[in-house]
Structure formats: C-alpha cells, structure tokens
Image (cartoon, helix red, strand yellow):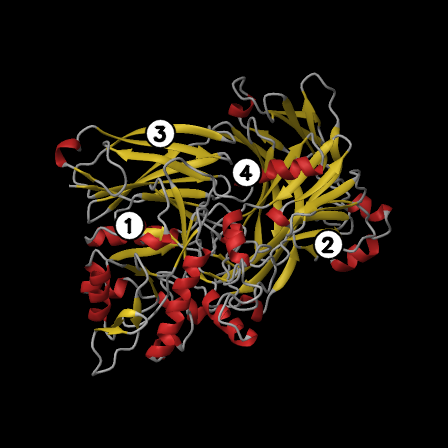
Amino acid sequence: MSKQTLFSVQSRAIKFNHFATAMLLGLLSLATSSATVPVEIDSNVTAKSGVIKVSRADEDTLRITWPASSKETGELVIDLRPDQPLIQSLALTRKGQPTKALATRLDPVTTLTIGERDRKKFDEAFRGMVFFENPREKPHETHPVLLAKKSVHVSRNGTRVTVRIGEVSAGSFTGDLHFTLYPNSPLIHLETVIRTKQELRAILYDTGLSSASPDWQKTVWLDPRWKLQGEAPDIMTKARPLAVKQRTVVAAGNNGSIAVFPAPHQYFYPLDFAENFQFNWLGSGYSKMPEGFGFGIRQPLHGDKRWVPWFDAPANQEHCLGVFYLLSTGDGEQALKEVASYTHDDRFKELPDHKTFTSHYHIEHTLDFLDRQKKQNTDGIPKGLETPGFVTKFKETGVDIVHLAEFHHGWTPAQKTPDRLRMLKAMHEECARLSDDELLLLPGEEPNVHLGGHWISFFPKPVYWVLNRGPNEPFEENIDGYGKVYHVGSPDDVLKLMERENGLMWTAHARIKASIKFPDEYRTKPFYQSDHFLGAAWKAMPADLSRPTLGWRVLDLLDDMNQWGQRKQIIGEVDVFRVEPDYELYAHMNINYLRLKHSPKFAAGWQPVLDILRTGQFFTTTGEVLIPKFTVAGKESGEVISKRRTDNATLRANLEWTFPLAFAEIVSGNGQSIQRQRIDLTDTESFGRRTLRIPVELKGQKWIRLEVWDIAANGAFTQPVWIE
C-alpha cells in the first residue's frame, strides 16, 4: 500500500472505526514499510551559536527546542513513522519546571481547492492582474493535502530554523511541509509550500490542527461581538464554519494553550464587502479532512457572492500556504490576548506627531440617511442612524481621519443639478455631525467621469459640483441655499475645478478593475501632470501566495510614475462597501500615518490633510510594521536632497514591528532604470525596534524610497525622497 497519509491519521482512524470510510474517500492508506526517514541537518543548525536546538531522540522522532521567551522554552517533537500523527507533542515550559505537553498526537490538516482563471480576462488585464473574475463558477475541486514522510531537511536562515518534510501533494500541486521556529518567540510558522506546472490556476486553502484523541480540555474563541465562546473537544462533533473575532481559535488544556491563526492580511483575498464570512472552522471531518476533532482557518469559496477572484497561482512558482501556531502557558483567553498583540488588538497604534488616515469607502451613508428620512417622514436624524455602525468601527480600529467615496452608482453622473446638490449637502452635513474630537469624517467621491477609468476626488472643504455640464451651462454659478456651484463636463473642467478649490484627485485601483489602462493611458495629459493629481492608491490586490509582499501592483506603479518624470505619491485605499462593528475589516485594511500633530476641525476645513498627501509626508502600512522616522541624507519623504548632499549619503529609518521581520528593500530610480537593494532582517525577533543606517549611492538618481516586510507579508512603505 501507499505510504501517503493526510498529515498521518491512520492509527486513530482504525481505533475509531473510520478506516473503511477513509479508504473510500482516498484520504489515507496504511504504510507497511518501517524504513527510517533520512534526516539532513545543516551544519549551521548544529553550531553552538544557534539557540534553536534540533536532535534525534531516536530514529523515528525529531526534537526541536527553542527559547520561546526569556522565561520559557518551546518544544516540538515530530514523529516520522508513517502510521503516526506528525506532531507527537507540543510543549511550552517555564524555566526550572518539568516539561509538560500542551497537546499530543496532533496532525496539521490542509485542503487545497484548485480552480481555473479566465483566460480572456487574463489576456486583457494589465500583466494578468484580474479582480473581476469568479473561479467559483468554473470547474474546481477540493483536494486533501497528502503527506508522504520521505525526507527531512533542517536548515537555518539568520537566527531561524526551518524543518522541511517531504513530500506533499494535492491535485496537480506538489511540494514540502515547512515548520519555522523563531528565537524568543512562541510562534511556529507552518507552511505547505507547493508548486504546479499547470497555468491559470486559482486556489484556496483551509488548514488547522486535528487529533483523533484530543487531550486538551476546551476549544476557545471570541465571537464577532467580543463574547468569549468555548466547548469541549469531541470527535463526534460535526465540523462547522465559525465567525470569529480576530481570526483565532485556541485549544486550551491544563498545561497551557495552542492558538491557530492566519497571516492577518495575506490570508484574505480581495472582496468588495468585508463581512465576517466565517473564516474559521471547528469539529470533526471538516471539508475533505480526516475524521478527528480539529480547528483552524478557512477561506470561503463564495466570499461575498459578487466578484470572488481567489488567489492567483502562477505555474512553476512556490506557493506558501501558511498558518501560525502560538504556544502559551496561559488559558484560552490569555492565548487570544497574546495573538491579538501581534495586530495591536486589530487597532492601528498611536504614534507621536502622526494621525491615521484611511480612504475609499463606499458606505453610502448619505443615500441610506435620505432614504430613511423619507420612510420615517422626518427632516431630522432617522432612527437607527444616531451613531452609525461604521463610526463605531472606525473608532474601535484606531482611525483618526476617514475619507469617504460616496455615490458609487452608475446613475450618479447623469443626475440633475437639484438632486445632486441635495445629496452633496446631506453628505457634508452628516460628515460634520459625525465628526468629533476622536474621528474626522471627510466627504469624498469616486466620480469616474471625464478622465478615464475610476478615480477619487478630495477637496479641503465642502464643495458643490455637478458631473454633467451641459453645452449652455456655466462652469461656475451661485445657487441659493448652496452658494458656489461648479459644473464639469471635460478633463479641462475637472482640472480647473481642482485648481480653483485646491483639491486632489488620483487613480482608484490602478491597473485593475475598471482602471486597467490607467493612469498609464493619460500620463501625458495636463490633469495628470498637474500637482493636483496625486498619483494612485495602494491595496493588496490581486492576491498571490508565491510573493512575500502585498500590493506589488501599485508599488511597481509608484516606481513607474516617478520614472515618467512627475513627482507622484500613492496612498493606501481600502475600497469596500459598508462597514459595521462585527465586520472583519482589519484583515482588508491598511492605514496611512500622516505627519500631523493634530486633526483639523471639520468646520475649519482640512487643507493640512491634503497638503501632507500632496507633499508625501506620510507612510503606509498594514499596521504591524511601522516606520515612525525615515530620512535619506537628512531629508524626509517628500523633501528634496540637493546635489551637494548626495555624496556619502545615509538612509536612516526607525522601525517597529510585532511579527519577526523578513527583509527591507531600498528602491531608487534614475529615470531609465530602477535599483533595488535588499536588507536581510532574519536576525529580528517578535516585538522589536531598530534603527537602520544604510549607506546609499545617490549619484544620478532622481528618487529613493523604503519598504519593510515581515514573515506574514505584513509591511510598510514610505513615499519617495526626491533628489535634485
């Protein structure tokens, strides 16, 4: 019989009389060979300088120990026998105490759903990047990820150690299983690293931990309303999806807990809606996983049932299906708190002399407000909208300033002037009402007229403008009840408006969605070359697990725009519809940290916000990596280095992070070519700070910027520093 197992569950399957069922499903088969699995351990792993120790307890087990903190030691024991669970035990022990397992006889379990991408849309897209497609509506199949314990290779990268176990397979994908351990961290990073030769594949994966004989006492999680939930493990409990706060489920026992959670942003493919679509699972026999009680993370096939693009899976690339385990000596609630610390409790951390700014939300509060007023026959605040859910959510998430993108409807450009002005007035008044000392809510739109593709408008005060100027209509007029009103009917009109009102505009979801050709096709136009055209907006879209970063689509565009000759910026955008308190918003968010000491008051206008964006005085992040200070030759982002200061220049960056970092990259350009310098950061641990001091060659360069990324593909990037 085959030696393959679904991360090995054979002996338990027999014990619980599930063997016949499992054979029918093709999930497992008994191994008859007792041959020893070859184990290769690199010499730098066994060196005395390494703090992570790997040893052979006997020919069938591999024992890894590491300092999980200054007071605790983690232990992972891997069982290499083909008919046994892969993880013999997981332990976390306080100094001076005997080793006690948190849980034993565990199997990592994973399924891979493989679908097809749309060939026509791929060919029509910019470099194959597509959002408007639905692999769920094309043929697809879910496969168990099978592990054959054939070989083990232990390697060291920086201070980290990775145990690679081969081979795994799922449909047309093959590869290895990787456990990575980090000094002074309770994290275990498990990755199923696979590749395929087939083109135009789209994938999803679900993963977790399972046991046919669970020996922990309770499985614990927070529901979307922050209520602690829990239940005892029972292999007879049918598996079900869970809506969970902060994406984490914990196995809690007498000796401590094991939390399972995903990379907080990378695991989530882009959607229009950020509802909690039950991204976790619990119970026995989930999907095509084996019988046995388990828990973990999941990616729903149907998402918000609109455009659900899944993950791109380019051929002949390594795709890393990752998950994190966190070991804790505390109970389940304590383990949840420890996981939450890696995302600052899903809240963007306060930084001195900075304010957090987020943009591009199609909440459509204005239309909801007017509709409820009509239905309730009132001119006042409709019942149910006294404090809208999105206001509560933004405050909970640590956002200081929100820029809306209202009226995202096809009928908006054709609106008659009275209807348009009534809507704008309601938006302005509601933004004023809902703004306070904690949150500044700013009006904005995605008007999508006259320029090409989709774009965002932003003014420093309430501005009344109509999108469809007729042949005999003036560009500007005064209308009772509104004051100055603009009518725009061309790109020249839009630029003139921005100049009159000192506004900003930029490309929304550049090079994808309805902006596939933009800003590339209008980069020679006067409105693009104007200082009133900011550039574009950054979001993690599309999704591709073969890349160690997010949002390369727009980072590449930032470099291209600055190579074209104009000084442009990119800001983080979120681009979702609706926001409510129980939504999984953080996973889809990024944030811009503006170099701004105080938020403006709505009544006084918010010109300082636009000035900071226009001059690049900010950095953008997913939240886990921060760059509070960044200079090159003493100049901050948005500033200009004079020629006389280009010799012997130094890049300095103050970094803060939660997950261990992976690398930083310095990117610069001279108008003809782009240079990249990667700085290895594999010596970093969890929750650290560091100041980078890197000599940089600036001769002939026109701009320079910095990116920093961690092990979970969380990251931060600066705007360029310009070079004279």
Q: Amino acid at mark 4?
A: Tyr
Q: Earlier in the sequence, mark 4 or mark 1?
A: 4
Q: Which residue is mark 3?
A: 692
Category of crowding for the residue at label 3, using alpha-carbon neighbours closer than 10 angstroms: few (below 14), some (14–19), many (at least 20) = some
Q: Say which residue label 1 marks.
A: 559
Residue linked to disc 4: 342
**In the image shown, does 329 or 702 lie closer to the viewer?**
329
Q: Residue type at mark 2?
A: Leu
| Left-right relation of 59 to 422 | right
562 w.r.t. 65: above or below: below
- In contact (CB < 8 Å): disc 2 and disc 1: no
Q: Is residue 349 above or below residue 245?
A: above
Q: Is residue 699 visible?
A: yes
User: x, y (%) of residue 347?
Assistant: 51, 44
Pinpoint residue 153: horizontal percent, then vertical percent: 58, 34
Vertical relation: 534 (above or below) 599? below
Q: Nearer the viewer, mark 2 or mark 1?
A: 1
What residue sits 50% from the left and 51% below the top?
394
Dot 1: within a 10 Å radius of its alpha carbon, few (fewer than 14), some, or many (20 or more) residues? Answer: many
Q: Which label's residue is closer to the chain start, 2 or 4? A: 2
Q: Which mark is residue 180?
A: none
Q: Is residue 352 left or right of residue 244?
A: left
> Mark 2 sits on what residue?
27
